[in-house]
Image (spheres, grey):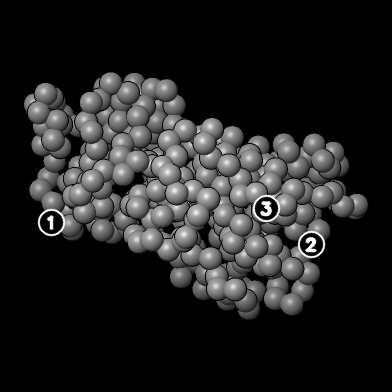
């Protein structure tokens, strides 16, 4: 079987079960072919997770569900940003390294220099990286060039600078300055947005950098003229996730179907990285936790937290990497 790939720009997955746009979380379901988790004996001890803030809440929910099955397990979770995951795995201070972006080549190289092999990547959820505005903002949507014009000082896409809402297509808000919220540089979401929305350009100094995804959304919900980016799982009633266009065409909603198809321009996998020596069995506690994550129960928790479950192909790939 070929490795499962979610193409973020083009159609890369034929998801026959999800051919209609899915707008509400209640419409999202775990792939019926994904098995439920079966408990095993001898699972106990301490499990440490250091990494992504985007995954912080869902890691907590997974930990609670896992501990309910194994009362002698203690899971510690620290979510200060994806950039903290690779050093934690290298230094051995965590068995789990959740990340909202793929590891960079230099991070993989540093791990390989230490251990002689590469870290193991497990896809655990799908996120529509969302651009949020205040709930009362009537803008219909934005294209990727407009995002570059709003957030970037270098505007590598060739977009003009955008500082007011009428310049972003909202004539009724002429002259009203756009207030910009974002993440700090330790965040994988910061890096992902920089790469995909800013064409790897620089952020404006005007961006109000926040320490976590929740703070970005809270900032926008309290600021009528605000705009910010965060994982879709942090959506609240005070904000609205904008439809986006990759090429100036039709706006695309951040739904599960549109992520699977690649039509939503900022769909991404969320990952957990681990240290597994090739040819050697993974220690029981880490293996069973990740098997729980990739089970029907674990992926149902993904939906509960507002993200999207991975398809069966990704589960099969992940389980294969745990062996």
Judging depth in this view, the residue of 9 and 148 nearest the camera is 9
| Sequence-first tag of 2 and 3 | 3
| Sequence-first tag of 2 and 1 | 1
Label 2 sits on residue:
283
Label 1 sits on residue:
158
**Percent position of residue 42, x then y:** 90, 53
Q: Crowdedness of circle 1 by 10 Å Cα count: few (<14), some, many (20+)?
A: few
Name the element at disc 3.
loop
**Percent position of residue 70, x then y:** 83, 42
As displayed, is residue 301 above or below residue 133?
Answer: below
**Percent position of residue 76, x then y:** 69, 42
Name the element at disc 1.
loop
**Percent position of residue 10, x then y:** 35, 61
- Relative to 54, 243 lies left or right: left
Residue at image coords 17%, 53% = 155
Q: Is residue 152 visible?
A: no
The quarter of the picture where the N terminus appears is bottom right
- Relative to 103, 171 lies left or right: left
- Relative to 38, 99 lies left or right: left
As displayed, is residue 189 above or below residue 172?
Answer: below
Label 3 sits on residue:
34
């Amino acid at each position: 079987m070929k490795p499962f790939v979610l193409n973020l720009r083009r159609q890369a997955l034929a998801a026959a079960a999800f051919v209609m746009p899915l707008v509400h979380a209640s419409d999202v379901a775990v792939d019926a072919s994904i098995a439920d988790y079966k408990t095993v004996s001898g699972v106990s001890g301490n499990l440490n997770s250091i990494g992504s803030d985007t995954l912080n809440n869902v890691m907590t929910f997974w930990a609670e569900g896992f501990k309910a099955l194994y009362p002698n397990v203690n899971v510690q979770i620290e979510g200060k940003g994806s950039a903290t995951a690779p050093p934690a795995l290298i230094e051995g201070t965590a068995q789990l390294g959740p990340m909202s972006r793929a590891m960079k080549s230099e991070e993989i190289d540093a791990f390989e220099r230490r251990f002689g092999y590469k870290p193991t990547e497990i896809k655990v959820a799908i996120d529509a990286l969302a651009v949020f505005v205040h709930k009362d903002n009537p803008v219909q949507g934005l294209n990727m060039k407009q995002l570059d014009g709003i957030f970037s000082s270098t505007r590598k896409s060739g977009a003009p600078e955008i500082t007011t809402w009428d310049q972003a297509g909202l004539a009724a808000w002429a002259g009203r300055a756009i207030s910009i919220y974002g993440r700090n540089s330790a965040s994988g979401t910061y890096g992902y947005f920089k790469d995909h929305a800013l064409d790897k350009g620089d952020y404006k100094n005007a961006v109000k950098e926040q320490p976590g995804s929740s703070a970005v959304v809270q900032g926008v919900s309290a600021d009528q003229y605000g705009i910010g980016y965060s994982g879709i799982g942090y959506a609240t009633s005070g904000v609205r996730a904008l439809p986006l266009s990759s090429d100036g065409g039709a706006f695309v909603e951040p739904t599960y179907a549109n992520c699977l198809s690649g039509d939503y321009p900022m769909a991404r996998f969320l990952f957990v990285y681990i240290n597994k020596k090739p040819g050697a069995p993974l220690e029981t506690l880490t293996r069973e936790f990740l098997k729980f994550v990739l089970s029907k129960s674990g992926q149902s928790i993904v939906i509960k937290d507002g993200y999207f479950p991975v398809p069966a192909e990704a589960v099969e790939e992940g389980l294969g990497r745990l062996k």
